[in-house]
Image: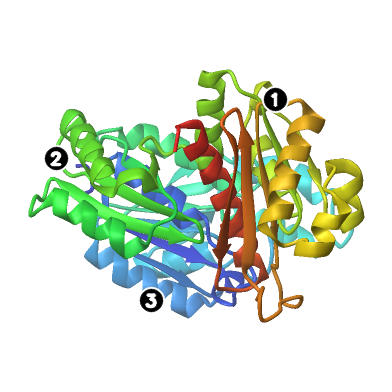
Amino acid sequence: MKPTSAAIVTVGSELVTGLLVDTNTAEISLALARAAILVDEAVSVPDDSDLVSATLARLIANVDLVVVTGGLGPTHDDITRQAAARALGVRTTRDRDIEAGLNQWVKRHGDPRAASQVLSQADVIEGARVLPAVKGTAPGLVVPTPRGSLILLPGPPREMRPMLETLSREWGDESEPPAILRCTGTTESDVQLAAQDVLGGRHDIALTVLAAPGDVRVVLFDRGAGAGTLREVSEQVARAIGRACYSTDGSSLAETVLRLARVRGERLATAESCTGGLVAGALTAVPGASDVYVGGVVAYSDDVKTSLLSVPSDVIARHGAVSEETARAMAEGVLAACGADRSVSVTGVAGPGGGTDDKPVGTVWFAVSGPEGTVAEMRSFPGDREVVRIRSVAVALDLVRRSIEGE
């Protein structure tokens, strides 16, 4: 019988102490969502056998499917197998075939005491189905429970993913992929309210809003609406949000800009100061960007602004490096230097130092130069250096998007 409820447990002291960020939960949750299996709870627990056992015992009694990652490897803190066996009240036995395969790994260790730890990965919970290790050495296990199944997967994502793909094929793909609308230059609350106005009281589509500096995502999950209705509603939500919504298929802002430029047959260039090449990095991170993006200049010092971007030294002397005039000159300079059709420039005070009363930290000037001429815009961003730079990249790309679209 197919499970209808699930829980995810990530095991590792490195997760609860902040030494490592848990990405497994997100991947597993998405795989379960595609199979129309709802996750009731997700929890991270340290490498404490008693706590892991108690957590699993509680979840096994309350949900159909419990998926666990971590604690299956060859070190002293890999305690998940034994803790899971204790939660189920069953034993573990040594699988001789797995053990034989692990012997080659034993030979690689200089300390003879490592052998017992490596071979412990061959211990299998009574009644379990083994998921062979595709990467790494730790196999996964699928163990029957009174309500359904307990699944144990390795913690390292590269080892976990092949097993998750196998399980995903078994679970099936019953739910439509979520519709992901991406927005910038707006707030989480504004897009949430716009989406809720469209959704009204309907229960066949679920809404989640995810926010990060310069990027707000509206995620619409199919809960019985079907592909056609989900697509229609997502388009309605996009219209309700307005120009701030730049993508209805999950495409990033850089991907959207490159697509628009490609359709127009335009080539792009960048001139950056405070962002230090992050705008160029966002564009070139997209495969195939080379047919649109021709290049850029990171002009951090005033000398580079004048020598490579042809910014007149008297412009910087009169108005400063962070100014409308300098931003305009940078955009026009890189446009000419790279032989591009459209360019964007960024110059600002990212902090933590360098601010003045007239130009406090967070002051950033942008300019876009293209066939229609050059336009400049100033923004003032709150937050630390990292946030100022991230928001600056988003604004720079969005100004290019709007420029190409005729705003």
Q: Which mark is residue 224?
A: 2
Residue holding disc 3 = 54
Q: Quadrant of residue 135?
A: top right
Q: Earlier in the sequence, mark 1 or mark 3?
A: 3
Q: Which mark is residue 290?
A: 1
**Residue 368 spot, x, y in % from top left:** 61, 42
Disc 3 or disc 2, which is closer to the eye? Answer: 2
Q: Quadrant of residue 405?
A: top left
Q: Going by the image, does 202 lie left or right of 262? A: left
Question: Relative to 185, does residue 388 appear above or below in the rendering?
Answer: below
Q: Which mark is residue 401?
A: none
**Residue 389 spot, x, y in % from top left:** 65, 60
What amino acid is found at the position of numbered circle 3 in the picture?
Answer: Ala
Residue drawn at x 66%, y 81% as measured from the top left: 357
- Describe the element under mark 2 as helix, strand or loop: loop
Residue drawn at x 80%, y 63% as measured from the top left: 318
Nearer the observer, 129 or 48: 48
User: Is residue 320 visible in this depiction of the protein?
Assistant: no
What amino acid is found at the position of numbered circle 2 in the picture?
Answer: Gly
